[in-house]
C-alpha cells in the first residue's frame, strides 16, 4: 500500500542549566507520518549523553529506547499543528537538561493516489576544535528504505570553496571526514551541503542537507599591545600615569582572551592594575631635575596569567612633566653700581639668575621686583628674554644734590607660582651711588602759570620766569630765550626773564585749548648749559564778539492758508557769560510782516504775520548776547512752493542757470542775425546782381518798388530747399514743407507773409500753396498778430518799415538768394520753435524773463500807432515827415533811407 511521507526540518539548539551539556540543541523538530503506528522508532540524531544521563519523556505515548531513540507505544494520529513533548536528561547529581521535541506531519496528494516523496534528512552541527589534524566526523545517512541503492556527495565551503579540501564524504557509506586543520580565527563556522542520489537513476532522493561545522577555539594566539606606550606625569605627584591597551585574537569571552597586566621593572616607582592595565605612581619623590624619563617593562598574559597562558612584553616610556619646584637663585649675594645724575632711561646693571626648572617655560622665566628703596620711582626692573637676566634701569633723572646714595632690594621670582617645594623667593641688596656732573640752570619750577585777559594792552608785563644754577643757587649770567611761541603774543626779556604782551591776545584762537596757551622757555648759563621750562598762560575771556547768524538765507515752504516760519540760529565765539543765552528781536525798520519768538538759548523762530507771495524777503533781526551786546542783521528768507515736502526752488534756479543764460542769449543772437540780414539787403538793394548759376542762388523780381506801402504778404519770401517747376504753384520735397503742417494756402511767420512769387530754377526761397504751424498752428497767434505779427515786428518796426517797404517789399528789382543763408534761416527757425515750446512749459517755475509773452495788437487805436504809417507816403525820396515822428521811428527811418 502506497504510503504518504512528509519531510521535516530538524533544528537543534543546546540549553544547559548546570554541568556538562547532554543535548546539543534545546529543541528539535521531526517530520513523521501523519499516522504513527505503535512501535514506530523516531530517530533523534546524534543525541549521545553518555551512560551517566537517564533520558525520559513527558509524553506517556512515547518512551526512550536503549539507543536513545524515541519509540511510539501506541498508534498516534497527528493533527495539523503537530505534537510537542519534552525529552529530559538527568545526571547522577539530579540536575536535568530539557530538549523540546516537536512532531510535525504533512501529506502531499498526487492525482488521487499516494507516492513516495523526498524527505528532509538532517544532522546536528559538528563542534570541531581548531587545528585538529584528521578525524572521522561520523555518518551522514538518509532514512531511505534501501540504503544500498544510495550514494552521497558534498560541496561548498570547506570542500570545493575556501578553505578547499577540508572535508569529504565516503561515496557509499556517507562517512564524513575532516582531512586538514582549520584556524578558527580565519573560519569560525563552515557550512557546506550534502546530497544523496539513487545509484540507478542518479536522481536525488532527498532534499540537500546543510551541514554546519563549528570550529571551536583553542588558546593558540598570544595577546598583543595596541597603541603607543608613551606616558607622562607631573613630577613630585602621586597620580595616574596612563593605561596600557592589549588585545587577543582568540574567541572573545573565553579564558583565552582574559588578559593579566604586570610590571617586570620599575615596581619601586610605578604600579599597574592587573585587570585594566592602568599605570600609576607609587611615590611623590619623582624629581624631573634628577631624572626626567623612566623606562618600565610591561607584561601581558592571557588565561589570566594561569597555567597554559601565552604572554608578551614591551617597554613603556614615562616622562616626568615639570612643576615650579625650584625658585630662581642669584649668582652673587649683593651688587654695587654707580650712576651719573640726570640720567634717565639708562641701563645701569645686569643681574643674572639660575633656575633648574624647564627652560623657556613659566617655571623658568624670571620676574624681578624692586621691593625696597624705590618709593619715589627712580628705578625700574625688566627681564632680558634671551638670557633671563634682570635689567636695572633709571626711570627719571637722579639729583646728586638731593640723593648721593640709594639702597635697593631686588627680588627674583618666576612667572608661575612655586609648587611641591618648601623653598621661597630670594632677594639681594643693590647699592646705587649717584655721581655729580656739572648741570645746567634750573627754573624755579618746571611750569609757571599766568592769568591774562585777552584785551590786555600791549607792552604790559605779566610776570617773570627765572632760573638758577642748581649748585650755586645763583641766577647771575643766565640768559632767557623763547623756544616755542606760535602766536608771538609774548616777548621775553633776555636778561631778567620778564614776560610782556606784544600783540593782541585772542582767546578764540585755534592755537588755544580751553583757553590755555603754552610757551616753552630756555635758560642758558655762561658755560652754554641749558635748562627748559614751560609758561602756561590762561587767557580770560572778554566780550569782544557779538552773536552772528551764520546762515543768512533761509528757505520757507509756502502752504495754502497757513503762515510759515523758519528757524534762526545764532553763534557767538565768546564763552559764557559773554555769549548765550541770546535775546532775539525784530529790527527797528522791519515792515511788520514778520515776528520773532525765542526757541532756546541760541535759536529763535521767525514767523509770518500775514500771507506773503513767493519771493525773496530781507528781514532785519536783532540778536544780543547775555551782556546786551549785539547788532541788527539782515536775514534773507526765500518763500517758495514746496514739492514732496521740500523746497526745490533754489536748487532748480541754480541747476537751470545755464539754460536760463542760453535762453536770454538766444533772442540777442536772433536779433543780431536779423540785423545782419537787414544790412545785407539795405546795402545791396540798389545793385544789380548777376546770376551766379543754379548752385549759388536765383535772381527774383519784386512786385513793387514804392517805399512806405503796406507790405503785401506775397512779397515775403521764405527760403526753401525744394525746386519749383514752372507752372507749379507749390514747392514739393523741401525740409520746411515736410515739417510744417496746417493749411496749404499761404505761410505767414508773424508779420512776414510767405507766398509764391516767380519761378525758382535752383534752391527754392519760397513756400507757396502751404500754410505752416507758424501761421495758424501753435505759434500762429504769437507770431501772427502778437509780438511778431502786427506788433513790434508786424506793421511796426519791421513791418512796413525797413523790412516792409525797403528790403522785402522791393519791386522791379532783383533779389539774390544764397543757399547758406537759407540753411541758417531754416536752422534758427527750428531752434526758436523748440525753445519757445520748452519755455512755455517752464513758465511756472522760472525766475528769468526768457519765456514766451503775448503782446496786444499795436495797430489802430493804440497810443503809439502803427509803424505802417511810413508806407503811406507816395514819394519815398521825401522823408521830411519823419522829423515829427516819435524818436523810436527816427532810427528806423535813418536806416531805411540809406542807399
Image (spheres, rainbow, N blue to C red):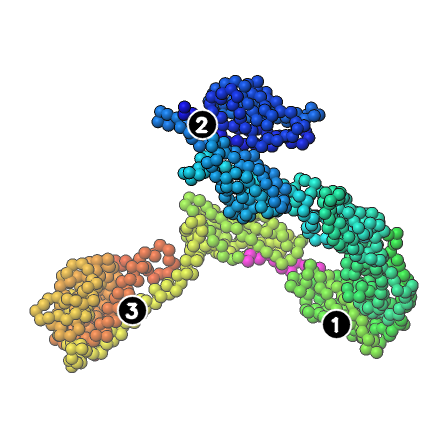
Q: Which residue is mark 3?
A: 670
In the displayed structure image, the side of residue 676 where residue 89 appears, left or right: right
In the displayed structure image, the side of residue 689 where residue 451 appears, left or right: right
| Residue at mark 3 to residue at mark 2: CA–CA distance | 132 Å
Q: Which residue is mark 2?
A: 5
Residue at 68%, 63% in the rendered image: 512
- Of the numbered discs 3 and 2, the one sitting upstream in the chain is 2
Q: Determine which quarter of the picture holds residue 362.
A: bottom right
Q: Is residue 200 above or below residue 503?
A: above
Is residue 546 a member of the stretch shown in magenta? yes
Q: Which residue is mark 1?
A: 482
Q: Residue furthest left?
A: 727
Residue at 35%, 61% in the rendered image: 849
- Of the numbered discs 3 and 1, the one sitting upstream in the chain is 1
The part of the chain drawn in magenta is 539-550
Q: Residue 698: image x %, image y %?
A: 15, 76
- The foreground one among 243 and 146 is 146
- The foreground one among 704 and 434 is 434
Residue 321 is labelled as none
Amino acid at each position: 500500500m502506497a504510503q504518504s511521507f512528509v519531510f521535516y526540518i530538524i533544528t537543534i539548539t543546546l540549553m544547559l542549566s548546570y554541568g556538562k551539556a547532554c543535548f546539543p540543541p534545546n529543541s528539535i523538530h521531526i517530520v513523521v507520518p501523519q499516522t504513527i503506528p505503535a512501535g514506530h522508532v523516531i530517530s533523534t540524531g546524534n543525541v549521545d549523553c553518555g551512560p551517566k544521563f537517564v533520558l525520559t519523556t513527558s509524553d506517556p505515548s512515547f518512551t526512550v529506547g536503549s539507543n536513545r531513540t524515541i519509540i511510539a507505544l501506541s498508534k498516534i494520529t497527528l493533527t495539523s499543528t503537530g505534537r510537542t513533548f519534552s525529552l529530559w536528561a538527568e545526571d547522577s547529581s539530579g540536575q536535568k537538561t530539557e530538549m523540546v521535541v516537536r512532531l510535525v506531519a504533512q501529506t502531499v496528494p498526487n492525482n488521487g493516489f499516494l507516492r513516495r516523496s523526498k524527505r528532509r534528512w538532517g544532522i546536528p552541527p559538528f563542534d570541531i576544535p581548531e587545528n585538529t589534524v584528521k578525524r572521522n566526523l561520523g555518518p551522514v545517512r538518509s532514512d531511505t528504505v534501501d540504503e544500498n541503492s544510495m550514494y552521497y556527495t558534498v560541496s561548498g565551503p570547506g570542500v570545493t570553496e575556501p578553505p578547499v579540501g577540508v572535508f569529504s564524504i565516503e561515496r557509499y557509506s556517507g562517512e564524513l571526514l575532516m582531512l586538514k586543520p582549520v584556524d578558527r580565527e580565519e573560519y569560525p563556522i563552515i557550512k557546506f551541503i550534502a546530497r544523496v542520489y539513487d545509484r540507478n537513476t542518479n536522481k536525488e532522493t532527498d532534499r540537500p542537507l546543510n551541514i554546519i561545522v563549528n570550529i571551536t577555539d583553542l588558546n593558540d594566539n598570544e595577546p598583543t599591545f595596541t597603541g603607543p606606550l608613551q606616558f607622562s606625569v607631573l613630577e613630585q605627584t602621586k597620580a595616574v600615569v596612563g593605561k596600557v591597551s592589549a588585545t587577543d585574537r582568540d574567541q572573545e569571552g573565553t579564558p583565552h582572551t582574559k588578559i593579566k597586566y604586570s610590571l617586570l621593572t620599575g615596581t619601586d616607582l610605578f604600579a599597574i592594575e592587573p585587570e585594566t592595565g592602568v599605570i600609576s605612581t607609587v611615590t611623590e619623590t619623582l624629581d624631573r631635575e634628577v631624572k626626567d624619563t623612566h623606562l618600565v617593562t610591561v607584561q601581558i598574559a592571557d588565561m589570566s596569567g594561569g597555567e597554559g597562558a601565552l604572554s608578551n612584553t614591551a617597554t613603556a616610556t614615562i616622562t616626568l612633566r615639570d612643576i615650579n619646584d625650584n625658585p630662581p637663585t642669584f649668582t652673587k649675594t649683593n651688587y654695587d653700581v654707580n650712576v651719573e645724575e640726570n640720567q634717565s632711561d639708562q641701563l645701569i646693571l645686569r643681574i643674572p639668575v639660575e633656575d633648574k626648572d624647564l627652560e623657556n617655560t613659566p617655571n623658568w622665566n624670571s620676574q624681578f621686583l624692586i621691593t625696597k628703596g624705590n618709593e619715589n620711582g627712580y628705578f625700574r626692573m625688566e627681564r632680558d628674554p634671551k638670557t633671563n637676566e634682570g635689567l636695572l634701569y633709571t626711570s627719571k633723572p637722579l639729583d646728586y644734590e638731593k640723593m648721593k646714595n640709594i639702597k635697593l632690594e631686588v627680588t627674583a621670582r618666576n612667572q608661575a607660582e612655586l609648587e611641591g617645594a618648601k623653598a621661597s623667593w630670594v632677594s639681594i641688596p643693590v647699592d646705587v651711588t649717584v655721581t655729580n656732573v656739572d648741570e645746567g640752570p634750573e627754573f624755579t619750577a618746571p611750569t609757571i602759570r599766568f592769568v591774562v585777559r585777552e584785551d590786555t594792552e600791549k607792552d604790559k608785563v605779566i610776570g617773570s620766569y627765572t632760573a638758577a644754577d642748581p649748585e650755586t643757587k645763583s641766577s647771575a649770567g643766565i640768559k632767557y630765550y623763547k623756544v616755542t611761541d606760535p602766536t608771538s603774543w609774548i616777548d621775553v626779556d633776555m636778561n631778567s626773564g620778564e614776560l610782556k604782551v606784544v600783540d593782541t591776545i585772542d582767546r578764540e584762537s585755534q592755537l588755544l585749548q580751553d583757553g590755555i596757551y603754552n610757551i616753552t622757555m630756555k635758560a642758558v648759563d655762561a658755560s652754554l648749559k641749558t635748562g627748559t621750562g614751560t609758561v602756561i598762560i590762561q587767557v580770560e575771556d572778554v566780550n569782544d564778539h557779538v552773536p552772528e547768524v551764520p546762515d543768512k538765507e533761509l528757505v520757507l515752504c509756502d502752504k495754502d492758508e497757513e503762515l510759515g516760519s523758519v528757524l534762526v540760529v545764532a553763534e557767538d565765539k565768546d564763552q559764557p557769560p559773554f555769549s548765550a543765552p541770546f535775546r532775539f528781536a525784530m529790527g527797528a525798520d522791519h515792515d511788520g510782516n514778520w515776528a520773532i519768538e525765542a526757541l532756546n538759548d541760541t535759536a529763535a523762530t521767525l514767523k509770518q504775520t500775514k500771507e506773503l507771495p513767493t519771493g525773496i524777503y530781507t528781514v532785519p533781526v536783532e540778536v544780543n548776547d547775555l551782556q546786551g551786546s549785539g547788532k541788527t542783521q539782515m536775514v534773507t528768507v526765500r518763500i517758495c512752493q514746496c514739492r514732496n515736502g521740500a523746497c526745490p526752488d533754489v536748487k532748480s534756479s541754480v541747476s537751470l542757470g545755464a539754460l536760463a543764460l542760453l535762453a536770454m542769449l538766444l533772442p540777442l543772437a536772433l536779433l543780431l542775425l536779423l540785423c545782419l540780414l537787414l544790412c545785407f539787403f539795405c546795402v545791396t538793394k540798389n545793385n544789380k546782381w548777376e546770376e551766379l548759376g543754379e548752385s549759388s542762388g536765383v535772381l527774383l523780381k519784386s512786385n513793387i518798388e514804392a517805399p512806405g506801402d503796406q507790405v503785401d504778404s506775397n512779397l515775403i519770401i521764405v527760403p526753401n530747399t525744394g525746386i519749383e517747376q514752372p507752372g507749379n504753384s507749390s514747392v514739393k520735397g523741401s525740409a520746411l514743407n515736410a515739417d510744417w503742417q496746417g493749411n496749404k494756402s499761404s505761410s505767414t511767420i508773424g508779420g512776414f507773409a510767405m507766398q509764391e512769387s516767380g519761378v525758382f530754377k535752383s534752391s527754392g526761397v519760397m513756400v507757396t500753396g502751404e500754410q505752416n504751424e507758424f501761421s495758424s498752428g501753435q505759434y500762429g497767434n504769437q507770431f501772427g498778430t502778437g509780438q511778431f505779427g502786427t506788433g513790434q515786428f508786424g506793421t511796426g518796426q519791421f513791418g512796413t518799415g525797413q523790412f516792409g517797404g525797403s528790403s522785402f517789399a522791393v519791386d522791379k528789382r532783383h533779389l539774390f538768394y544764397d543757399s547758406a543763408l537759407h540753411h541758417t534761416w531754416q536752422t534758427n527757425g527750428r531752434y526758436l520753435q523748440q525753445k519757445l515750446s520748452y519755455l512755455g512749459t517752464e513758465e511756472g517755475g522760472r525766475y528769468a524773463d526768457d519765456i514766451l509773452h503775448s503782446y496786444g495788437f499795436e495797430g489802430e487805436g493804440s497810443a503809439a500807432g502803427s509803424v505802417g504809417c511810413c508806407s503811406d507816403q507816395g514819394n519815398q525820396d521825401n522823408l521830411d515827415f519823419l522829423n515829427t515822428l516819435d524818436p523810436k521811428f527816427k532810427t528806423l527811418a535813418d536806416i531805411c533811407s540809406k542807399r
